[in-house]
Image (spheres, rainbow, N blue to C red):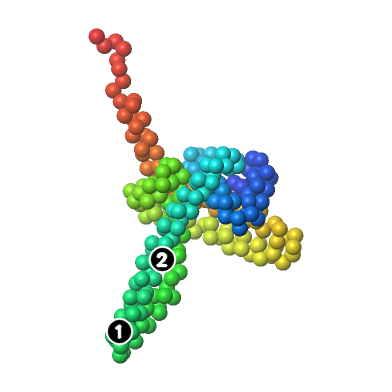
């Protein structure tokens, strides 16, 4: 999977694709280009699930923008809810410690501080769930699919997905080092958005592959309708 992900962005007409992605990266401060990039990454997930071996082209820009906005909504939803719940829990525990007072209150207060320091697992949980949610949306074309527990559960609970989803961390770490090296010079700094786009495409390819390999319900809806339409064929010799 790692080899496939790293080679994926440079398949086909990759130079033009990387150039477009890098330029959009430069312009991401304007927000709309950032949505377009995310929309393209969602399309990478979509085509990966469909079995395509080459990256999609930059086309149907309006559709890319819509996909990017919806992808942002999904990501924010998955991030906001657990983070908010976590912060509320920390504040309640710390507040209870202050209200109780004494040794027991001090213990509860320390517990609250330790909970605050344990924020990293919450972020890892978000990182673990968001790729599956985005891929489910990309595969079904419906925002509701990103929150379909029955669709997501087989993948999220599989050991294979657990292992595969952390492979991109290796790529991200290497790219982080490369970005630091390039940022030392002006010319290198100009290359950073293109390198980042390459890394994003590679990572999303791995996300899509991991999800597709573990989910057998991606086409459940369409398969059901096809089976229904194909059932009970008319016998031309009847009567």
Label 2 close to label 1 by CB (< 8 Å): no
Which disc, if any, is residue 176?
none
Residue 221 screen position, x and y as percent: 36, 38
Q: Is residue 239 left or right of residue 133?
A: left
- In front: mark 2 or mark 1? 1
Q: Is residue 211 above or below residue 126?
A: above
Q: Is residue 169 above or below residue 63?
A: below
Q: Is residue 204 left or right of residue 185?
A: left
Is there any visible trace of residue 44 in the rendered image? no
Residue 80 screen position, x and y as percent: 42, 62
Q: 40 or 149: nearer the eye?
A: 40
Q: Which residue is identified by label 2?
A: 83
Of the image marks 2 and 1, the number of the one nearer the N terminus: 2
Residue 198 screen position, x and y as percent: 62, 52
Element assignment for label 1: helix
Q: Residue at x 38, y 47 (%)?
A: 144
CA neighbours of label 2 inside 10 A, class few (<14), some (14 to 19), many (20+): some
User: Alpha carbon of mark 2 to alpha carbon of mark 1: how far?
Assistant: 24 Å
Q: 123 or 21: nearer the eye?
A: 21
The picture quadrant where one finds residue 174 is bottom right
Which disc, if any, is residue 99?
1
> Which quadrant, please, contains the C terminus?
top left
Q: Residue furthest bottom?
A: 102
How many tags in the picture? 2
Q: Residue at x 42, y 51 (%)?
A: 133
Element assignment for label 2: helix
CA neighbours of label 1 inside 10 A, class few (<14), some (14 to 19), many (20+): few
Q: Is residue 24 above or below residue 120?
A: above
Q: Residue furthest left?
A: 239
Q: Residue at x 48, y 54 (%)?
A: 72
Q: Is residue 217 above or below residue 164?
A: above
């Amino acid at each position: 999977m790692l080899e496939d992900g790293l080679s994926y962005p440079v398949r086909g007409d990759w130079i033009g694709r990387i150039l477009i992605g890098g330029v959009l990266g430069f312009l991401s401060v304007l927000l709309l280009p950032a949505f377009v990039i995310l929309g393209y990454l969602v399309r990478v997930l979509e085509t990966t699930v469909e079995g395509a071996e080459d990256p999609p082209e930059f086309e149907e820009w309006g559709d890319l923008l819509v996909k990017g906005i919806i992808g942002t909504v999904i990501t924010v939803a998955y991030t906001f809810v657990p983070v908010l719940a976590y912060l509320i829990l920390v504040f309640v525990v710390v507040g209870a410690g202050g209200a109780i007072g004494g040794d027991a209150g001090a213990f509860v207060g320390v517990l609250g501080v330790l909970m605050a320091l344990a924020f990293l697992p919450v972020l890892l949980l978000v990182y673990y769930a968001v790729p599956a949610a985005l891929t489910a949306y990309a595969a079904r074309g419906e925002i509701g699919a990103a929150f379909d527990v029955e669709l997501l559960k087989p993948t999220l609970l599989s050991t294979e997905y657990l292992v595969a989803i952390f492979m991109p961390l290796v790529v991200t770490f290497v790219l982080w080092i490369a970005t630091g090296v390039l940022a030392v010079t002006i010319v290198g700094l100009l290359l950073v958005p293109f390198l980042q786009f390459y890394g994003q495409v590679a990572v999303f390819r791995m996300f899509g592959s991991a999800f597709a390999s573990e989910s057998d319900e991606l086409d459940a809806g369409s398969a059901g309708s096809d089976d229904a339409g194909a059932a009970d064929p008319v016998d031309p010799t009847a009567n």
